[in-house]
Image (spheres, rainbow, N blue to C red):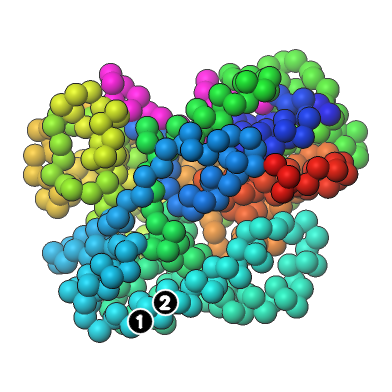
Amino acid sequence: MKTAIIGGGIGGLVTALYLSKDGHDVTIYEQQSDVGGRLSFVEHDGFKIDEGPTIVLLPDMIRTILQETGINPDRLEMERIDPLYPIHFPDGTTFVKWSNRENQLEEIKRVFPGEEESFLRYMDDMKDRFNKGRAAFMDRDFRDRKSFFSKANMKTLLKLKAYQSVRTQAKHYFTDTKMQDAFSLQTLYIGGAPDETPAIYSLVPFSEHYHGIWYVRGGYASLVELVTEELVKRGVKIKTNATVTEIETDGKKGTVLHVNEERHAYDSFIVNGDFPVSRKLVSGEKKGRSFSPSSGCLLLYLGIKGELDTDTVHQFYMGESLDENMKEIFEKRELPTDPSFYVFSPSKMDKSLAPKGYSSAYVLVPVPSGDSLSEKEYEEYAEKIMDSLEQRMDKDIRKKLVWKKMKTPIEAKKEGLFDGGSFGLAPSLFQSGVFRPQLQPFPYSNIYAVGASIHPGGGVPIVMQGAKLLAQAIREKEQVSRPLESY
């Protein structure tokens, strides 16, 4: 079986691992000079920092998928981070989040006295909901829409209170607005506003506490290097700088791939990219349904002489109002006047990411998707963020700065991300579960899709899970006798 995978993001790469294990002759076509997609490195004069995802969640899911696809998971060196991160509020309050329950209770007692029992109730409720939610939504696909609307699934949806938003659910447990923020801001990991993201995604802040936040030694994008090494060893062909312009069809199935002005016949095709963009590659595919993008990101990559004045790898700096911040981004579609932002300082635990005597850092500011703002406006806004960093984190940050690189939604859109959004489709109610594009979203028998905009959704482990679901579906279709569990 000759299979073409269009796009070398982590979804496409993991799909290639599964299918090559099943005997497919796989070729990956990537338009950039390197595979990895969002999961890549920015490098400059000895500085090395993750370009996209930095917070490693669900480590067991990652390790299980590596094991299933024939990679020793111990080769991906992961270290647990605890405390998870501090959240700094503009009034000077700092709340530290912990995976260790006793430490978290002590911290809640110190900062938000009276919320301790609410936290325990939250964790107990969410543990049950996580197990039910994973089985009902993450571990299955919904090509058959009726399976989503089954009596059992509807019961689970009600149990998860999916009709609520993440913000509403946080208010149900916690009375202090800052505490609500601390258990809502995680929707930004997948580019959604807390008051628009369904409550099933409350499982993300739960998972931070229960499963922990981890760090991949050498950077998260080291996962791509590990997977690529295995694919090359198996003889999977990886073509970079390969621009795919069309998947030709005969009305029933895909037949020929058009790439770099050449034509190649394949038995099956897998599109790994943001669906609203990549669906245009399929010949005869109509425009179809419109979608809403996730938030964009203003990203600053920094090379620092010495160390930043911080003790933690991850930290969040909040504006006066998270709700107002989200309205400016998602409704008004303008740069927030009082932004919340995230700072990543990997050199705190990994000296390999910068020259000796230096350190690397990364700042992420949620901003509107799209290209309506100019590079000059982003440059001016980046200076405002640097002002905030001077005032709230390290007064000497500009003096220590030896290198800075900026990335905006303008570049992200040029690279093929849907409307410059950093996380694929926004995780809204009607873009989640059965309402999200499924792994076979085209009316052709042999064209499939995988990636952050495809069910089950965004985030590295979840995209890897989507690749697993796709491999299962193809295996079932081909009636391959070897079950997944035998790997």
Mark number, residue 118: 1
Please name the amino acid that badge 2 sits on. Tyr
Left or right of 445 in this view: 244: left
Please report the residue visible at 48 percent of the width from the left and 49 percent of the height from the top: 59
Where is residue 6? Give x, y as percent: 67, 31
The reply to whether discs 2 and 1 touch (Cβ–Cβ < 8 Å) is yes
Q: Quadrant of residue 116?
A: bottom left
Residue 23 in magenta stretch: no
- SS state under label 2: helix
The residue lying toward the viewer, choosing from 368 and 79, is: 79
Residue at the spot of label 2 = 122
Figure label count: 2
Mark number, residue 140: none
Where is residue 160? Give x, y as percent: 57, 75
Which range of residues does the magenta coloring cover? 28-48
Q: Looking at the picture, does residue 353 appear above or below residue 471? A: above
Left or right of 231 in this view: 306: left
Q: Main secondary structure of the magenta part?
A: loop
The residue lying toward the viewer, choosing from 66 and 469, is: 66
Q: Looking at the picture, does residue 68 appear above or below residue 109? A: above
Q: Residue 305, can we see it?
A: yes
Q: Looking at the picture, does residue 350 appear above or below residue 141? A: above
Q: CA distance from mark 2 to mark 1?
A: 6 Å
Please report the residue visible at 48 percent of the width from the left and 78 percent of the height from the top: 125
Q: Residue 443, can we see it?
A: no
